[in-house]
Image: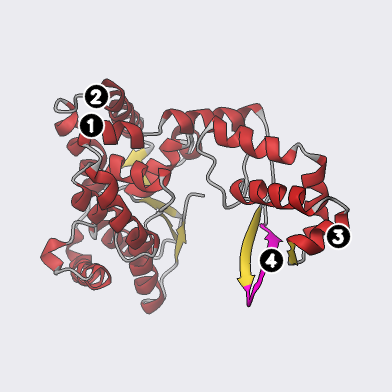
Amino acid sequence: MPEVIIANSSAIIALQRRGQLATSLKGKTVFITRRIYEELVDKPLKVLSRIKLPELRDKIKRSVSEIISLIERGTIRIPEMDFRSVSKVMDEARLRIAKIEGISPDKVKADHTVIGLAIYFARKGHTVIFLSNDKAINSVVEYFSKREKLKIKVRTIP
Amino acid sequence: MSMNGMNISSLDTLAFILRVLSRVGVLRLLAVLRGKTMSAEDLAEEVGIPISTVRKYLTEMERAGIVEKFRTGNATLYRVREFRIVISPEVVGSVLEREKTRMTADIIKERGIEIVKKLREIGPLVKEGKLSIYDAAEMLGVTYVEAYALLEENGYI
């Protein structure tokens, strides 16, 4: 089974801020979730017109453009998948995040679907490289990986 | 240039680290301190540099992230942080890229100084893994991209 690379928002932004997003992902396919796309593309685009400071507007615009371009080239992909098989894991992930953060589960904004995506591929027998600089998310992924004896390698961007 | 565990986010920081490392006295201290923990006084005696100069160098080395200071009882000791320097036009270019992406000042101008207060409360929680960056963004009232920039540029990621 081939390795599957999954990146959450933090990894994409970390690479981008180092000017290494396109070069690091060259020749690779990285899977993200619809939620990550919303965080990195849809939401910034929505607020863009309200940002008064041109410098800030330009930086956000550049970030969004690069991600859109990588999606268009097929480097970053949003898999169309049936999340039903991992719905229980995602619910549990949300509960675990809520517990870590000390808030009620309905208040959690963290992307629990990316955890579902990693588990989905890992349960199919893939080795999953999970790129993330978010310690809270990483701890939940590592918990599931250990519990289900899955091959998920959590990697942070230095 | 990359230095393990260091966040070189601007050319100013890079130049500062290189400036500190350009002093022969600093390099002597590094060589002696390698693999050991020592006080400023012991270092001064071993290297033969006046204690006032050693203290000045150690302060700069600490600011540059080359050494770390810690206390044992009443003694203040120093040790070298593991680091490796690789410098190339590409790496300098990537530091410049990172500098261009700095956003804290822009975000403060756009959203007001209040965001700094919130960041001081929220940042340590992210650093400890007790809060996800998504939820930090929500609490700060900014986009994910801005939240990441604020947290990274202020040493919380």
Circle 2 is placed at which residue position? A53
Q: Residues within 10 Å of mark 1 (few under 14, many from 20)?
A: some
CA gap, disc 4 and disc 2: 46 Å
Instruction: In the rendered structure, find residue A121 and report the number of the disc placed on it.
Output: none
Q: Amino acid at mark 2?
A: Leu
First in residue order: circle 1 vs circle 3: 3
Please give the name of the residue rendered at 61% of the width and 66% of the height, measured from the top-left corner. Answer: B70
Local secondary structure at mark 4: strand
Please give the name of the residue rendered at 18% of the width and 45% of the height, measured from the top-left corner. Answer: B141
Please give the name of the residue rendered at 24% of the width and 49% of the height, measured from the top-left corner. Answer: B137
Is residue B61 in the magenta section? Answer: no
Local secondary structure at mark 2: loop
The part of the chain drawn in magenta is B72-81
Q: Nearer the viewer, residue A72 or A1?
A: A72
CA gap, disc 1 and disc 4: 43 Å
Q: Amino acid at mark 1?
A: Glu
* Discs 4 and 2 carry the same chain letter: no
Predominant secondary structure, magenta span: strand
Circle 3 is placed at which residue position? B45
First in residue order: circle 4 vs circle 3: 3
First in residue order: circle 1 vs circle 4: 4
Circle 1 is placed at which residue position? B110
Instruction: In the rendered structure, find residue B77 and report the number of the disc placed on it.
Output: 4
